[in-house]
Image (spheres, helix red, strand yellow):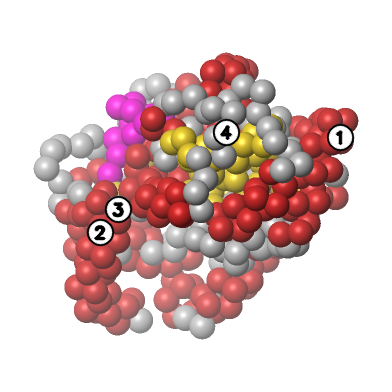
Amino acid sequence: MRAFYSGLFYLVIPFIMLRLAWRGIKAPDYLCRWRERFACYDKPFPEGVIWFHAVSVGEAEALFPLVRQVQYRHPELKLLITTTTPTGSARVSSVLKNTVAHVYLPYDLPDAVDRFMQCFKPSLAVIMETEIWPNLYAYCGKNSIPLYIINARLSGKSARGYQKIPALIRPALAQVKRIATQTQDDSLRFIAIGASGEKVMTLGNMKFDIEFSQELIEQGLQLKSALFDKRFAWICASTHKDEEKICLEIYREIKQELPELLLLIAPRHPERFPEVKKLCEQQHLELVTRTSNAACRPSTDIYLVDTLGDLKMLYAASDLAFIGGSMVPVGGHNILEAAAAGVPVLFGPYMANFKEIAQGVLAQGAAIQCLDKDAVVKAIRMLYKDPAYREALVENAALFVRQNRGAIARICDMLAL
């Protein structure tokens, strides 16, 4: 079955490259370093690395505290971080700089996997969340490289998909030494798709161990003071196509009764920055971009976050946060960063990717779920008028985060790092 999978993968490579080129029209970074996706490198790298893989920005952010923990405990170790997306790559380079080696994960082709492994010769492989690559896993098993999946999660939909190809998935999972899942439901789903129950353990969600220093919060407050002081700042973070339109409709509806309202929009994907800017301009809204570093005037409507890596600081600068990917059927994004920043959190009805976290914050009175646009309008009005309610949400969210910390320490123990 794996030979058939590999042959099929080779056949579709031209189409994958065309897709990269197409995405590169809006996001030129997709056209860069494409040779890394075939494990062809222009410079030497260290061998005998501890290798961590995080597909994109969200996984990388969750991984950083673990990497720092390993670096603190074992400064002599050589670390490799791989990502799949340019945004994930940029975040790794920005945060960890030259303290780790970093390349894109190669495509799961036998020759690319072999070149990658021969270059880095990892002594340990650690995969974040849900990345099951049959050839990569087979190489680890054949060459006795300990392989772990950490912070593992598996939706019911994904589990049903994997169950349709057991001849491919079961042998891959057999090469994994341990699977550390976020929840008991994730554990049961991994077992259902073929993982050995003895290898699966529920260790919690690493995203609760988020790093949010007092210095970062102070930077956010300084930013607010410098750029939009005396404005009630509502940030819509990690937004997707069509969500910005909804946010602008809400803004127009309540702006007259909340004249100091300022809408901050942080699109999830950088290639959409020009599109969102154009949308705001078409609606004749006064706009300031983050890259301009200009201060907002009393008449400014929109502050467009057209940068990467500033979201934590901007949460700290805001009075209210709405988490995107949840008003359209994307599945939501991580709400814990905003909660840790001390800002009241709203999110929409589509939170399938963060179901347990969403249920937890709602049960603890730590956030508000808005099922439609009218509910968002109502929530903003209520929170604006009631500072005590805002403070209660913030306190409950901080307690919820504290109560669920500890996954990284448990994972370090499992990895013996």
Q: Are marks 3 and 2 in contact (CB under 8 Å)?
A: yes
Mark 3 residue element = loop
On the image, the x and y values in percent for residue 317 come to 61, 27
On the image, the x and y values in percent for residue 263 come to 60, 41
Say which of 367 and 375 sits in front: 375
Instruction: State the extent of the magenta-drawn residues as a range.
Output: 93-103
Q: For the residues carrying marks 3 and 4, which lies nearer the camera in this image? A: 4
310 relative to 87 in the view: left or right: right
- Residue underneath mark 3: 27
Q: For the residues carrying marks 1 and 3, which lies nearer the camera in this image? A: 1
Numbered circle sitting on residue 25: 2
- What's the distance in space between the residues labelled 3 and 2, CA to CA? 6 Å
Q: Name above or below for residue 27 compared with residue 393.
A: below
> Label 2 is placed on what type of residue?
Ile
- Residue underneath mark 1: 386
Which quadrant of the rendered structure holds the N terminus? bottom left
Mark 1 residue element = loop
- Residue underneath mark 4: 299
- What's the distance in space between the residues labelled 2 and 4, CA to CA? 34 Å
The quadrant holding residue 402 is top right
> Label 3 is placed on what type of residue?
Ala
- What's the distance in space between the residues labelled 1 and 2, CA to CA? 46 Å
Which mark sits nearer the N-terminus, 2 or 4?
A: 2
Mark 2 residue element = helix
Q: Are marks 1 and 2 in contact (CB under 8 Å)?
A: no
